[in-house]
Amino acid sequence: MGYAHPMDYQSLLEEIRQAVRADFGRGAVASYIPALARVPADKFGVCLLTVQGEEYRVGDAAEPFSIQSISKAFMLMLALRLGGDELWSRVGREPSGTPFNSLVQLEYEGGIPRNPFINAGALVTTDLVLSHLPDARKALRDYVRVLAQNFDIDFDRRVARSERRTADRNAALAWLLRSHGNLKAPVARVLDLYCHQCALAMSCVDLARAFLFLANRGMSPLLGEAIVTPAQNKRINALLLTCGMYDAVGNFAYRVGLPAKSGVGGGIVAVLPGRYCVAVWSPALDRSGNSLVGVSALQLLTQMTRHSMF
Amino acid sequence: MGYAHPMDYQSLLEEIRQAVRADFGRGAVASYIPALARVPADKFGVCLLTVQGEEYRVGDAAEPFSIQSISKAFMLMLALRLGGDELWSRVGREPSGTPFNSLVQLEYEGGIPRNPFINAGALVTTDLVLSHLPDARKALRDYVRVLAQNFDIDFDRRVARSERRTADRNAALAWLLRSHGNLKAPVARVLDLYCHQCALAMSCVDLARAFLFLANRGMSPLLGEAIVTPAQNKRINALLLTCGMYDAVGNFAYRVGLPAKSGVGGGIVAVLPGRYCVAVWSPALDRSGNSLVGVSALQLLTQMTRHSMF
Amino acid sequence: MGYAHPMDYQSLLEEIRQAVRADFGRGAVASYIPALARVPADKFGVCLLTVQGEEYRVGDAAEPFSIQSISKAFMLMLALRLGGDELWSRVGREPSGTPFNSLVQLEYEGGIPRNPFINAGALVTTDLVLSHLPDARKALRDYVRVLAQNFDIDFDRRVARSERRTADRNAALAWLLRSHGNLKAPVARVLDLYCHQCALAMSCVDLARAFLFLANRGMSPLLGEAIVTPAQNKRINALLLTCGMYDAVGNFAYRVGLPAKSGVGGGIVAVLPGRYCVAVWSPALDRSGNSLVGVSALQLLTQMTRHSMF
Amino acid sequence: MGYAHPMDYQSLLEEIRQAVRADFGRGAVASYIPALARVPADKFGVCLLTVQGEEYRVGDAAEPFSIQSISKAFMLMLALRLGGDELWSRVGREPSGTPFNSLVQLEYEGGIPRNPFINAGALVTTDLVLSHLPDARKALRDYVRVLAQNFDIDFDRRVARSERRTADRNAALAWLLRSHGNLKAPVARVLDLYCHQCALAMSCVDLARAFLFLANRGMSPLLGEAIVTPAQNKRINALLLTCGMYDAVGNFAYRVGLPAKSGVGGGIVAVLPGRYCVAVWSPALDRSGNSLVGVSALQLLTQMTRHSMF
């Protein structure tokens, strides 16, 4: 594809930063909990890490934000690590075609969530992790700290408490899962861990570091060790591409064309296998719940580098 | 229709009792909680009360059993008494066309249950009653005791505890209602009262007495006072006919043709307005969850008297 | 119930006619085909026939209008007459809980419509009638003429043609039925007959006469012969009460409390078993597709006579 | 990724051919039309074309078979060529989460199919093509002939006729689309073209040639001209990856990890952008309707080359 010379990612990111300014003011910051609604809409950061270890940053790349649903990817990784393929008897691996918090699919399909990135599926991965670890909350935090090589990463307790107070619909999902025998731990414990993982505060730099292994066949260049097996890595990337962007995976695959996971905190983390991991943050969301400016920035990145999955 | 002469209901009930023996052994006793599964399948009782005050009994008419969903009618009556038409902004009055415990309809229709006799609707009437009464459980029991004129009526605590342990799906419904703002009291309190009302132990005699007013424009002949207004009475009977027999209202309307409410304990209570209230009990259920022998008995009753609603 | 003296129905109907004037101007005339949209919204007629043969009329009771879905009741009667219980292996007898023209229920339930009064169910009764009769269209017309004792009754060809041109969704239902093996005749023939039956032009007088037998255990007092068996009669009345008023059967059962069938032409026919058959016509519809003034008029009738099913 | 040396694809394909023999006998040949049911289950062919123009074949690579739903990709390409982005107001670009021929999603979402690869979506692309071309059937055939550089490619008339006779469900979809105003041409014409495109008979060699441009940013190396724009190319590949394998896209993305389209004739065509296009044929299908051996073969290909999208 003609990439003999090293890409000047820093100039690229600067250029993208200028270009997306036109989009500031569009979209809406998530407002279902006060802690999220207070985040300034004009925050913007990007961090790109190559598998060779080069790091590029622009804007608020080092400022922590609420990772929200991006945490579902961490829980999936942990669940695979702890339980292996046990997980796949309890969660599917296909796009859902329904909103992320829908109970309809779950009822029609006997309590098996379509994939680990809709809420019901993430409740199952959370439950599986809980069943393997005595102090799962701490274990998750430590796991993420090691992956990102940043031991200041922590839960935002205020966000976690807010999440817990507005978790009625997730409670409905959890009880429905339980009625189908697909939730083992007490619902309150599952919801507590679920709300905490959503409230993990991480920066673009943290995220890019933590997910870099996905661009490198499961091996973390930072840690020099395998985080998941190559097969698991392929599975996770395939799931990210087909299920990672709420109800807009098709559009994201076209516009950006990278496996990615988004959160309503405005973060998106994406990988180009063999090349890089990139994390972007901009709080205002489009109608699908993905960062509006974040998607534009990633689209520019793959357009300007002329390199995506497709 | 030529009913100048008094009906010999006692002979009729005896004849019915003989006739339905052929059906014993068909159907299956509810088994989702042990307390129900232990009830002998060959129990059979009927009590018929005319609006003139004549009482006829056969078989195990005086033996208490778990009234289960029949209690939803009591909660509806209480909710109407306490809150009046306030209820109808929170619950619909149409058949659901979906199973009694489905979450699908609730999700598609914004958290408004189709009617007060599906589980979701009964959770809302329960919630409404809770919001009006300091000790709703006791109030419900006393209300039923007065209606039936039997002060020994009580909750079967063992059944109530069992119900509570298997209420996962109802918990899902409750949390989904709550996420739509259609449940005010804490979910645990609603479920606790809900499980207790299902565990009310009453006999056919109790039920026939308690619901006799429905055959008499809302006025209880036993108490000599109005239980509901004539308009509310019509509403309740209309709801019973169109929504009272789970997913078999059309078939029941044809075979029996009376407003009725059934429970998975094997009880059915039905009224012929202007004439009588009848309660029947036989624990084995058909595939719709209605007492198999109970429906047959009521069908014989309306065939032999040549008098139903139609 | 104290109806020893004959009811002065004529005065009652006059009173109702005055009372419902307040409602003129509310609701909307069906506009999906031009022929219906042109009908003046202030038309109003009632005809009540007692089983003893007394006839009472007010307003435009003798003016023919498009009976639309009321024809589904005729097709059900014909299908039962021609095929007996054969029908019930192909159509259910329960309320649908979904809009009258929905494909969803049909897909989920393997091509068996919930009841004969939703469009899919009526397509099946139409198909069954077609399979028994060489010239079903003429046979239907003659059947209705005899029932109503009016040999001028005919199809409104203009309406039938309009119906045919807007029958896309019914074509979808028909093909879906066919894909499940639940439609035998060619789709075009079924749709042609279906559109013609909807275009039958009848007056309130015609309808009251044609359906009077439903108030008389299946025996037509006009013809002195049985139209359906007493069991079939009960079945039809039960279906009318639980499924006859689109998605408003619960509300209609409460407000009126009679087995009834409505059409978007603004007609409603209803029966009080043992007493009378009544037909009302007023073209403006409520949101459920039932005649707004028609429902009010029937509500007044059962309130003022203090006699409904409940 | 270390692919300095040219890949020995021929040996690879031979090896794969040996390996998949173990799977012969599993799965079931499509039987809904006799013409498909008669195809021997042990047929197996692969053709791989690199963007540099090297061609590799094993087995029955040159034998034509019924391409079935693979034709949906041709119609999408033609619809984009003829109507540009006009298409996207009539068809979505997201996975459906429901079976390929479901009417449910279509009804709930106002007649807009989720993507061009479910039947409803393909009916819309077919309709759009029809509206632009006087003789669309011939135009499609010629388009495919040119793309594949094989002027013997034709419709299998016997298959087309069989398709037409079993197209009831597609007729239902077409009429439902039409009732929503999302089908312009007469239903019969749309279905006729739809059934013909499914009946195109092509070999693996034909398919690999016809779709090679998808691996080359829209430019056909065979023709030396652009078939679609680079943006359209990305769109098509993104759609193939997220929607191209019926209800098994997630699993296929994991096992194989290439944009691909399958048909119930047992064919699958897939591309690795920048490298190759590969077509495989084996008639027995897995439960998702994809070629069982075909998927295994492609999985081996990406495993053995250690190169997929992920």
Image: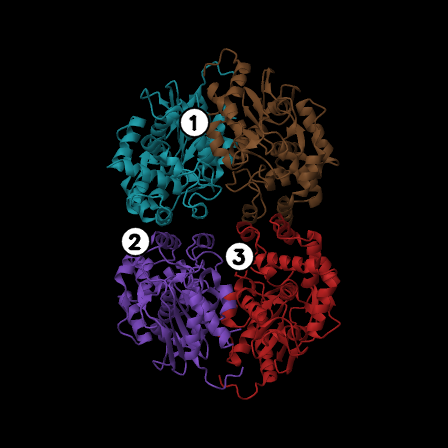
Chain colours: A purple, B cyan, C brown, D red
In depth, the one of D98 and D59 nearer the eye is D98
Residue D250 is at least partly visible in this image: yes
Q: Which amino acid type is shown beneath numbered disc 1?
A: Lys
Residue that numbered label 3 is attached to:
D98
Q: Is C27 on the left-hand or right-hand side of C206?
A: left
Vertically, is D288 above or below B181? Answer: below
Where is residue C71? Give x, y as percent.
63, 32
Q: Which residue is mark 1?
A: B234
Question: Regarding mark 2 in the picture, which secondary structure is present there?
Answer: helix
Q: Secondary structure at mark 1?
A: helix
> Mark 2, mark 3: which one is toward the viewer?
2
Horizontal side of C249 relative to B52 (left or right) equals right
Q: Is residue C147 above or below residue D33?
A: above
Marks 1,3: beta carbons within 8 A: no
Identify the disc placed on residue A165.
Answer: 2
> A214 or A290, which is in the foreground?
A290
Q: Is disc 3 placed on a helix, strand or loop?
A: loop
Subunit ID for the residue under disc 2: A
Task: Estimate the x, y position of residue D208 in percent, counting from the top left.
Answer: 64, 75
